[in-house]
Amino acid sequence: MGSGDTLHTDRLENSVDDFRESQSKELKELGHIALNTSLLSDLLEQAYPVIKDRVEIGFADLTSEVKSVRGTLQAILVALVVIAIILLMK
């Protein structure tokens, strides 16, 4: 083998080593991503009931507020109708 073949072989080995190192880094990163995804999934499973309860409570509060405002608006409307009737009778 000539020196050109040795140089080509060395470059090829370096390329293979670089590729393996790159693949190893990517596999480690994918492992970290998988672990983080698993942890987030576990956290969401634990937090879901709490979030659901709070949303339901918030919705119930909102519903009661809307009913309260609706009742107030109805009372104001009745008062305005009574005032209008009184003014029309004069």
Image: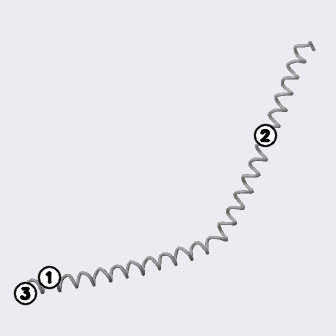
Q: Which residue is mark 2?
A: 23
- Side of 61 where 33 appears, left or right: right
Q: Nearer the viewer, mark 1 or mark 2?
A: 1
Q: Nearer the viewer, residue 61 or 33?
A: 61
Amino acid marked by disc 3: Met
- Residue pictured at 64% horizontal, 70% vertical: 47
Residue at the spot of label 1: 84
Furthest residue toward right: 1
Locate residue 46: give its quadrant: bottom right
Q: Say which residue label 3 marks.
A: 89
Quick one: 69 or 15, which is closer to the camera? 69
Q: Nearer the viewer, mark 3 or mark 2?
A: 3
Q: Residues within 10 Å of mark 2 (few under 14, many from 20)?
A: few
Quarter placement of the C terminus: bottom left
Could you tell me which quadrant the N terminus lies in?
A: top right
Q: Amino acid at mark 2?
A: Gln
Specify the amino acid type for callout 1.
Answer: Ala
Q: CA distance from mark 1 to mark 2?
A: 82 Å
Give the SS element for disc 2.
helix
Provide the secondary structure element on which disc 1 rests. Answer: helix
Q: Is residue 84 above or below residue 13?
A: below
Mark 1 or mark 2: whose residue is earlier in sequence: 2
